[in-house]
Image (cartoon, rainbow, N blue to C red):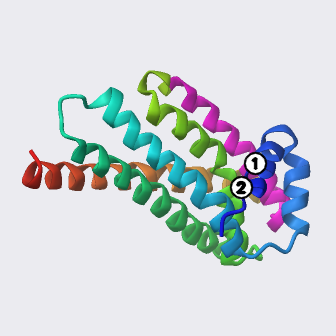
Amino acid sequence: MMDFRFLWDRIRLLVLDPEKAWYTICNESKPTGFIRNSFFLPLVILAAISAFFGSLLFTNTGVSTAYSVLAGIKYLVLYTSVVYTTTYVYMKITSYLNIKNDIQISFKIIVFSAAPFLLCQIISRLFESFIFINILSLYGLYLLWLGNERLIDPPEKLKTPLLLAGAIVFTGFFIIFDRLLTTIVDRVYFAFFA
């Protein structure tokens, strides 16, 4: 069940007072399923709906509605797969660096650090001319830095490499999965709906 008050409060806190947000995240006992259902999935669903409407109303006016539906599904799968694979790889990276971490902590770090990116995607997928707003996604790097410090407390010499590793893994998976899913969506659309 989604808790929209939790979603709003957490976004507000991450944007306005990120140190307090990470302190709260560190000390609360919210299960991963609650965070997934009340924070991550609502943002992903809103971004996918934005991609659908952006494609339908503004971007691809020459194609059928089926393409817009496929675009919405593509972005739903894209954001979900990127966050989950990044979470898994991030856990493995920290394990390799002998930093105490588990999948739940990695999920919290990645999901809350990806919030600015997902919020920007909600706007830029709906209004393609606002693509410049995605620069605000870089705020997620600051959230990743704070999340690492608060939840896993890496040694000083590993803080920057861990930040870079997380950013590179997230960006790499995003580029790879985006290209793969774009190819699949285009082939499905032109094979069945064009």
Q: Which residue is mark 1?
A: 8
The quadrant where residue 95 appears: bottom right
- Would residue 4 appear left or right of 53 to someone viewing this image? right
Q: Residue 102 at what x, y percent from top left?
A: 70, 78
> Is residue 147 located in the magenta-colored stretch of the structure?
yes
- Left or right, residue 78 beside residue 3: left
Q: Which mark is residue 168?
A: none
Q: CA distance from mark 1 to mark 2?
A: 6 Å
110 or 72, which is in the foreground?
72
Up-down relation of residue 84 to residue 15 (above or below): below
The chief SS type of the magenta part is helix
Q: Which residue is mark 2?
A: 4
Name which residue type carries label 1. Answer: Trp
Give the quarter of the figure containing the N terminus: bottom right
Residue 113 in percent (x, y) is at 68, 51
Image quarter hosting the C terminus? top left
**152 in the magenta segment:** yes
**What residue is drawn where x is 53% and y is 54%?**
44
Q: Residue at x 51, y 54 (%)?
A: 45
Residue 110 in sight: yes
**Which residue type does callout 2 highlight?**
Phe
Q: Nearer the viewer, residue 171 or 97?
A: 171
Magenta residues span 132-157
Image coordinates of residue 57 in percent, x first then y, are 34, 30
Number of other residues with Cα within 10 Å of mark 1, as a class: few under 14, some 14 to 19, many 20 or more = few
Instruction: Judge the density around disc 2: few (<14), some (14-19), many (≥20) Cα neighbours within 10 Å.
Output: few
Give the residue drawn at x 45%, y 33%. 126
